[in-house]
Image (tube, coloured by chain):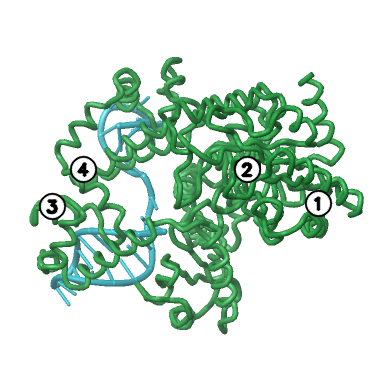
Amino acid sequence: MKNRELASIFEQMADLLEILGQDPFRINSYRKVARIVGDLTEDIEGLWKQGRVGELPGVGKNTAGRIDEYCKTGRITAHQELLKQVPAGLPELLDISGLGPKTIAKVWRQLEVTSLDELQQVIDDGRLAELPGLGQKKAKQIARGIVFRQKTAGRTPLGIALPIAEDLAEQLSRIAGVSRVEIAGSARRRCETIGDVDLLVQAGQGKKVIEAFTKFDGISEVLAAGTTKASVLLKEGFQVDVRVVSKKSFGAALAYFTGSKAHNVAVRGIAVDKKLKLNEYGLFKGERRIAGADESGIYSKLGLDFVVPEIREDRGEIQAAQNGTLPNLLEISDIRGDLHMHTTASDGTTTIEELAQAAKDMGYEYIAVTEHSGSSAIAHGLNAERLLEQIEKVRQADIRIKGIKILASAEVDILADGSLDYPPKVLDKLDLVTASIHSGLAGSAQKVTFRLLKAMESPYVDIIGHPTGRLLGQREAMDLDMAQIIATAAERQIALELNSHWVRLDLKDVHLRMAKEHGVKIALCTDAHSVEDLQNIRYGIWTARRGWLQASDVLNAKTAEELVEWVNARREARK
DNA sequence: GCCGTTTTCGGCCCGACTGTTTTCAGTCG
């Protein structure tokens, strides 16, 4: 699937045009195409073969021609031409906070800067500060932007940012005069990584709130502080923006700052169609505010069902909200068990008993204990003999501990050739089998896809664990042919895992949606290595919701009886 | 660039803050 690659070409064309100072609206249209193509669950080449590229929103005659050229030749002439006009090192400079296209063009034309290194040089020798329209402060701001980008690569995992955001929100709510605090932005949409944290405060006296906020512990630098907003850098290395708004505008501001930008633009378009004006202060008919205190009022006045933050991405939710066909998304209460966890028998830090008790306290009906298999030596994986002992321990625990069903399972390694790390007669003794790749993740697309497909041929595999193997900010996802993996999972009735640890979130939202559309069941599991890890399920729930999943799409939303039935049906088919 | 029309041109979101100016450009969200 070439969707990502094509999207990045359009994205880069937009960057190049921006540096060249072209029409901003034209640039915006390129960015829109990049986003549409990147989010597409269908293969763009498939769409092209059917001659349906022109049906995509935002794709006109010109863009359709370019996609046509790309599908035929693998490149776009206009893109190549643009690359010749701008030094290769410039587009990445757009990622530096405080540095925009105008300034990049200026340092390029006037100081002959063509790379990040050369930019650093003209900052250090003072030439950047001497450019007309710039100065000492601006130069320092850009220098900070460079450091920040190098330190954090720009994004922070939700699992790190959200607890900090929740703590800041709590502190803000204790400031005198503050009546309400909400986390907005991508953290509220529960995106897997957060660029910066947006906090919205309802209060009369903005200035006092800003003054108190900028004195909080944990702030390493105040970037901006006015009467209604402040931006600070935390010691953890990411930015927090606080905005103070009045009660009558709170809902409008919350919607506005929750985004996504694409969702907001589309909603605003609906307002315009109705001869209304929507901004961060409210929904207006002429001068009169007709909604704004709460989000639901705005959606309802626009003839839309309320759209939960997790799916505000302009991926079809607005049309669904108009038609009354928004899905009834998965809730944490729908989850009846966790099917992936480790004990001290392999690399966990806890026991079967402790996990079972904690799961019971969470209201679960069942758990599956899944140790690593022998080839994961570093994780003290179990060879066949030790696995049989572990199965016996699980059976005993299941008898001893009342009120929860404990399934004997395993996270069996998928080896380099796609075979499984236990022989069939051992696998046959397990209630449930998850198979995962733990090594050789950097292999070619062809190789890693082959390994997974091969493993899925086994009649013993019920679930594929953390299918892409990514670790946010640490390790790239495997270069899988996801369309083929999903098609095979659908055909063979194999569930795919949504590993809910916040560093994995694997599968991710768009792949979950793709799987759902093909009728593939998702196993929403924590891969817990401790009792606390079981709580990571909340990250999985949010990601599942971002993928439009409903309870009916989730394997472990089934009752214990239904789950056993599902497994047995697969066992029958195996014979 | 796309889109949609009271259809072939004109609009496409726009307000806050900073820094460099001295009324505004650039950046950001």
Residue lying at the far top in this picture: please name it: A50
Q: Which mark is residue A364?
A: 1
Task: Please identify which colour was used for chain B in the image.
Answer: cyan
Which sits earlier in the primary sequence, circle 3 or circle 1?
3
Dot 4 corresponds to which residue? A22
Dot 2 corresponds to which residue? A498
Q: In this view, does A144 lie above or below A562?
A: below
Dot 3 corresponds to which residue? A108
Q: What residue type is labelled 1?
A: Tyr
- Expressed as whole percent of the image width and height from the top left, the position of residue A544 reads 63, 44
Instruction: Give the chain letter at badge 1.
Output: A
Which sits earlier in the primary sequence, circle 2 or circle 1?
1
Is label 1 on the same chain as label 4? yes
Residue lying at the far front in this picture: please name it: A385
- Compute the Cα span from label 3 to label 1: 60 Å
- Compute the Cα span from label 3 to label 4: 16 Å
Q: Which amino acid does label 4 sit on?
A: Gln
Which sits earlier in the primary sequence, circle 1 or circle 4?
4
- Compute the Cα span from label 2 to label 1: 18 Å
